Amino acid sequence: MLIKNDFEVAQSVDKVWRFFDDIPQVAACLPGAALTEELGDATYAGNVAVRMGPVKLAFDGKAKILSRDDAAKRMVIDAAGAEQKGRGQAAMTITAQLAPAAGGTKVSMEQDLQLSGAAAQYGRGMIQDVTAVLMGQFATNMQQRIGALERGESLEGVGTASASGLAIGLQAARMALMRVFRRFFLPYQPARG
């Protein structure tokens, strides 16, 4: 399943790209993610925990930077992991593309995601909504960390706040309801004259 998310960071493309050089810093911005070991050859071990409604899914896995194009400001990462309780697997190829925007930098994230087991039971809409919530929190965390680095502040606890499982579930449910509302009710609005 292909999932696309765009967000903006109020920093220059060069600053955001330099931030992407530090994979542990980037991972610290993603709610529920933690790097546990640098394995060399642009490969990292880590874990990710995501709560989708009442179910918490926790994966252990590896991520490898497949390519990094400094001129085009484009990075491709391959990640795969197994659910800690043996309830499934996930594999994802992530492509991040940076471009100048009026307020700073537009970050386009494309995630080609394959799920099996417990995580696969959720529909495409729910997975896209949860991903959108996580990317929103990721963008906020990245902005805070880049700002703290510029000011020379300690990064202890900066830009690492994660959305709670309940908050993610509520935001994703709200997004799903808005999608249903738009699909079924907006086409039937009478024309205003």
Image: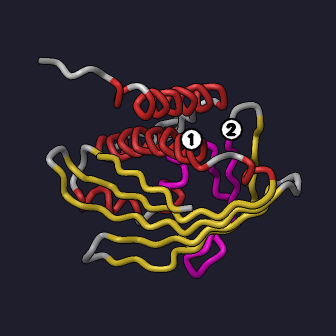
Residues rendered magenta in the picture: 26-52
Q: Which element carries disc 1, helix, strand or loop? A: helix
Find residue 14 and report its horizontal and vertical position in percent. 24, 62
Question: Residue 17 placed where, x, y %?
Answer: 32, 62
136 relative to 186, above or below: below
Say which of 156 and 171 sits in front. 171
Q: Which mark is residue 52?
A: 2
Indicate the position of residue 171 as horizontal and vertical percent values: 53, 28
Tell me if I can see residue 154 in this picture.
Answer: yes
Q: Are marks 1 and 2 in contact (CB under 8 Å)?
A: yes
Between 139 and 7, the residue placed more toward the observer is 7
N-terminal-most mark, 1 or 2: 2
Marking on residue 115: none
Dot 1: within a 10 Å radius of its alpha carbon, few (fewer than 14), some, or many (20 or more) residues?
Answer: many
Residue identified by numbered label 1 = 130
Secondary structure beneath label 2: strand
**Residue visible at 88% across and 57% down?**
86
Q: Quadrant of residue 178?
A: top left
Does residue 10 lie above or below 189 as drawn?
A: below
Residue furthest out toward the right: 86
